[in-house]
Amino acid sequence: SSYPFAIMWGPGCIGRTQPFCASLYGVEISQFVFYLQAFPCDSVTVKLQVYIVTVLDTVHSSTLISGFYHLWITCRANTSPACSYHHETITHYIKYCITFMVQVFYAQRVWISKFMVPTPLFFHSLLLRLFNCVCRELVHYSEYQLTVLFSTKYTPMSSIASAVCDAIITLSVMYYLRPRSIRRQNLVKRLLVVFVEMGMFTFINALSMVVLYYIQIPMLGQFLTVAPGVILSKTYVNSMLAVLNARKPIRDEERNALSRSIELPTIVTLR
């Protein structure tokens, strides 16, 4: 076809991410309610982390809806970058905060399990991501252009740093939490499957921002990275809640197996 990829698939791809983003937020709220009911005895630190990321993502969803309404309805005939400047900036900051907090939460879980973890590489990746965020915002304020939030040289660097963090955490958990005994093999394996699936989910989403950045065409597809960018925070929050909630069926199954193993036969059952 003679039409560029950005013109053919860009607007539709960005538009279809909005209902998907709303669906992910609904799943997130359901997981949050389930967590509160299933794990009332979790530590205060874990509960506080869950509360903070959920509240931040709620604010992120609200600012995202407000920003799109402002861009598509209020500023429909106005293409000035200043028209949606504040909405996009707040949403961008919150997305980085959520990503950072969830990755620190995962790193803390691995650190508690084993002390011999490649933490220097992990924290270097986090610092690189924070540095990219600061540089991008400095360019944003200096050039006062909305496109620099999604289409600068720092976009792929930040996404690659996020993907590296996800890969390090997932591989560390797979190595250090691998089952050591036959009795616990199935239970630990089920938990590892959930953890790896969630890690791959966030990893692929981060890499998709890199791919879309390099295939976009200047002045035609500068906003292609918006598609995975708007759901990035929700993938991380859902990943965190899914891993926490996966403990309940595994814990219940282990308790049932333990109760059956210590059950004593009664006189009626003796032969």
Image (tube, grey):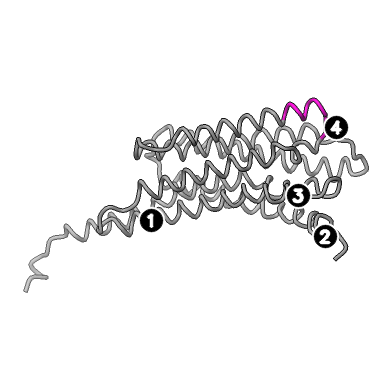
Residue 229 vertical position relative to residue 46 in the rendered view, above or below: below
Residue denoted by label 2 = 8
Please report contact status of discs 4 and 1: CB closer than 8 Å, yes or no.
no
Mark 4: which amino acid? Ala
Residue 134 vertical position relative to residue 218 in the rendered view, above or below: above
| Magenta span main SS | helix
Residue denoted by label 3 = 224
What is the distance, in whole Å, between disc 4 and disc 2 at their CAs?
27 Å
Mark 3: which amino acid? Leu
The stretch of residues the image draws in magenta is 137-145
Q: Give the crowd class for mark 2: few <14, some 14-19, many >=20 residues within 10 Å.
A: few
Residue denoted by label 4 = 82
Nearer mark to the viewer, of 4 and 2: 2
Residue 142 vertical position relative to residue 3 in the rendered view, above or below: above
Q: Quadrant of the C terminus?
A: bottom left
What is the distance, in whole Å, between disc 2 and disc 1 at their CAs?
45 Å
Element at label 1: helix
Q: Tell me what residue is drawn at x 62 percent, y 50 percent.
A: 205
Element at label 3: loop
Q: Mark 3 or mark 1, which is nearer the start of the sequence?
A: 3
Residue projecting furthest to the right: 77
Residue denoted by label 1 = 249
Mark 2: which amino acid? Met
Residue 16 vertical position relative to residue 266 in the rendered view, above or below: above
Q: Mark 2 or mark 3, which is nearer the start of the sequence?
A: 2
- 179 vs 168, nearest the viewer: 168
